Image: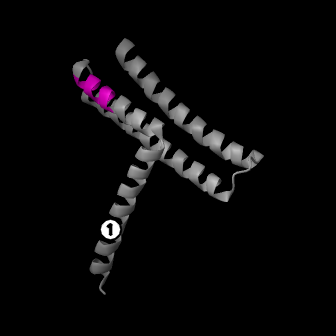
């Protein structure tokens, strides 16, 4: 099998894995669906509020980054849960840090909105 054929097959596999990851997270994590809804509202709002294209791009990108961090957090939680059901200090640390990463990213998006609206 040639290089191009192999890479096309790998790309197809990555697309399927990506879709599966999105659907699993959407199904299993209520917060992911909530962040999608917030992103839709935020994106619509960027076209209703007077802002530059750069500001609009920043708000949309930060919103999408919240989704990325939520996906990573879900992966961390799944890996920890796979290890076992007992509560271990290091497992709690990993899960709490993942949750904190989502919160920090969301705060960053909120601050960007506030700065754009009030400066």
Residue 26 on the magenta segment: no
Q: Quadrant of residue 65?
A: top left
Q: Position of residue 52 (x, y in %)?
A: 26, 25
Residue 58 visible somewhere in the drawing: no
Q: Where residue 91 sits in the image (x, y, percent)?
A: 70, 48
Q: Which residues are magenta?
A: 40-47
State the predominant SS element of the stretch in magenta.
helix
Q: In this picture, is 45 found above or below 101?
A: above
Query: What secondary structure is marked by label 1?
Result: helix
Q: Which residue is under mark 1?
A: 11
The location of residue 29, given as percent across then percent down, is 48, 42
**Quarter of the image containing the N terminus?**
bottom left
Where's the C terminus, which quadrant? Answer: top left
Q: Is residue 72 left or right of residue 38?
A: right
State the residue at coordinates (50%, 34%): 105
Of all residues, the one furthest to the bottom in this rendering is 1
Q: Quadrant of residue 26?
A: top left
From this viewpoint, is residue 75 visible?
yes
User: Looking at the image, which residue is at 60% across and 55% down?
Assistant: 79
Residue located 34% across and 62% down the image:
16
109 and 90: which one is in front?
90
Q: Is residue 42 magenta?
A: yes
Badge 1: residue crowd in 10 Å (few <14, some 14–19, many ≥20): few
């Amino acid at each position: 099998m040639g290089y191009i054929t192999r890479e096309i097959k790998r790309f197809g596999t990555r697309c399927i894995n990506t879709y599966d990851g999105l659907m699993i997270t959407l199904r299993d994590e209520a917060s992911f669906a909530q962040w999608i809804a917030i992103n839709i509202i935020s994106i619509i709002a960027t076209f209703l509020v007077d802002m530059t294209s750069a500001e609009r791009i920043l708000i949309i990108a930060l919103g999408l980054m919240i989704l990325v961090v939520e996906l990573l957090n879900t992966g961390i939680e799944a890996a920890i849960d796979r290890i076992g059901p007992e509560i271990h200090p290091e497992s709690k640390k990993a899960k709490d840090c993942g949750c904190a990463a989502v919160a920090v990213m969301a705060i960053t998006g909120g601050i960007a909105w506030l700065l754009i609206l009030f400066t």
